[in-house]
Image: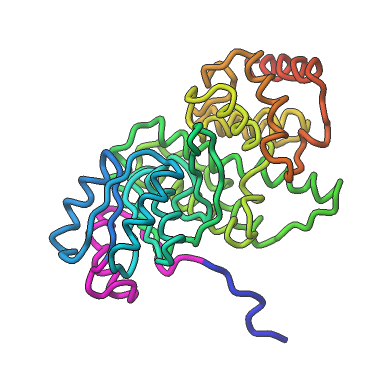
Amino acid sequence: MPVLARMVACPLAIEVRNGAVAALPGLLSDRRISAGGHVAVVVGPGLGEEVLAELQPALENCVAHSVSGGSVAAALELVEELREGSHDAVVGIGGGRTLDVAKYAASQAGLPMVSVATNLAHDGIASPVASLEDEEGRKGSFGVHIPIAVVVDLDYVRRSPEEQVRSGIGDALSNLNALADWEVAAEDRGEPIDGLAVTFARSGAESLVRSTDELGSDSFQRTLAEALVLSGLAMAVAGSSRPCSGACHEISHAIDALYPDRASHGEQVAVGALFASFLREHALFEVLGRALRRHGVAQLPKDLGLADEEFAAAVAYAPSTRPDRYTILERLDLGEDEIRDRVGRYVDAVDR
């Protein structure tokens, strides 16, 4: 009998607490990531620059790189900058876009990456996926190395807008729908399900379902951060985004393509997850709905700035965004009139 059933890629260190940023130089040294602090620090606008100012006195040998936006072009430009220098690692500091650019560039340059999150808007803080925009503004997902360390300083996270917190909640809770869609694919197409990936993805989401703490409290922020980290680990275990991405994310990708910049990713997948659960006629619809309401997360198309007709159009377009993925949308294969009918019934059910 083997002692180790399998090896799982995961960060060497995960720090989620108040004052975590101050411990970063020591973490780099203790974990032998960079004893001398020879790291490339990638920051975006906002709190990233403030974190860098706090760190620089202790990281005298770091080289700072500023990035703006989350595009493929920005990531490739950073790759060239990294290759011109000599670094032990890349430290990405900021929100999701900055971290995705840093993850992609670090992977292309062959360097380990440390993720320092200043908000909890989505599950990219510890995932092996970078979401980047092309020249036409279309988002694509790219496989990258999982961060070698993850730092979440609750002192900084607490200062982020509540909208970002709700986005993170929506992204984490949507795992429950993604897992239900994975079961649909297993039933209809024999797609294998990875039990360990399911455990990680479900554990984080259900901790939020059970939480009654205030959004701004340390206890809730810690629960959310850990749920998002578990989502990243679930994707690393599965080798794909399958445990965290189902019809909910197909619908979100469709909204991005048809009606860009209407709402955050996390709130779009929250509405997508709730609608997909309604289509599935499963108890998850009530469970997910209660959790979204309790935390003030979007539930209806109007919460995303969309008319019901626009949301129906996004649902119709959604399967084309991930042709390789099988979900409740592919199982039902609804026509446009049927989709409009289901959206109307869904809105009535949520508004009751």
Instruction: Indicate the position of residue 69 as horizontal and vertical percent values.
Output: 38, 38
Q: Which residues are magenta?
A: 10-38
| Quadrant of residue 322 within the rendered picture | top right
How many tags in the picture? 0
Residue 318 picture location, percent across and down: 68, 31
Q: Percent from the top left, x then y, of residue 47?
A: 26, 42
Toward which corner of the image does residue 62 lie, by quadrant?
A: bottom left
In the image, is residue 208 above or below residue 339? Answer: below
Q: Quadrant of residue 81?
A: bottom left
Taking the image as shown, residue 85 lies to the left or right of residue 246, namely left
Left or right: residue 16 versus residue 53 is right
Q: Residue at x 64, y 35 (%)?
A: 248
Residue 127 visible to an observer of this rendering: yes
In front of the other: 203 or 312: 312
* Quarter that holds the C terminus: top right
Query: In this rendering, is residue 150 above or below 287?
Result: below
Q: Residue at x 17, y 58 (%)?
A: 56
Q: Which one is in front, 212 or 326?
A: 326
Q: Nearer the viewer, residue 222 or 132?
A: 132
Left or right of 301 on screen, residue 40: left
Residue furthest to the left in view is: 57
**Residue 352, placed above or below residue 251:** above
